[in-house]
Image: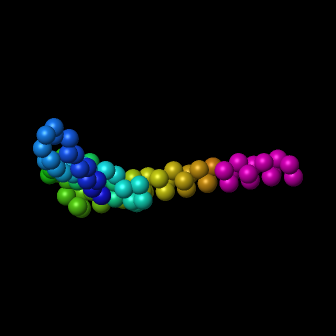
Amino acid sequence: MLTACLISSVVGTTTATLFVTPTMNPYARPNEHKVGQNRPKIAHTGPAQDIRTRQQRKAEKDAVAAERRAIKKAARRDLKKELQDELDENA
């Protein structure tokens, strides 16, 4: 949204100058405020940042998931053993 200001304050002559100033639309959605000069700039990291192949990234992700599954499995096994010991102790 642009706001136009008409300034005609020259002494002795009638010169009209039109200044166009950008203002924010108060009814715009949040993402519509970030346009023009105010828009966020995209910073590309480039290919040198991560040189792993797709298979290497997938293998690493699978290894992390397997490790988490093993931790959960061990925790469940430990809690089950504690519960069984507690039941045997009370019975």
Nearest the viewer among 60 and 80 is 60
Q: Which of the two residues, 56 or 74, is positioned nearer the viewer here?
A: 56
| Magenta segment, prevailing SS (helix, strand or loop) | helix
Q: Residue at x 80, y 51 (%)?
A: 88
Q: Residue, x 36% and y 56% (percent of image)?
A: 25
Res. 66 image quadrant: bottom left
- Can residue 50 be seen here? no
Place of residue 50 in the rendered image (x, y in percent of width and height, measured from the top left): 20, 49
**Residue found at x 80% / y 52%:** 87
Q: Position of residue 65 (x, y in %)?
A: 42, 57
> Residue 40, how many percent across, how many down?
26, 49
User: Which residue is drawn at the image coordinates 20% and 45% (left, top)?
Assistant: 8
57 on left or right of 71: left
**On-image quarter of the N terminus:** bottom left
Magenta segment: does it hold 88? yes
Which portion, as a residue range, is magenta?
79-91
Which residue of the protein is positioned furthest toward the right in this rendering?
A: 91
15 inside magenta stretch? no
Residue 85 pos. (x, y %):
75, 49
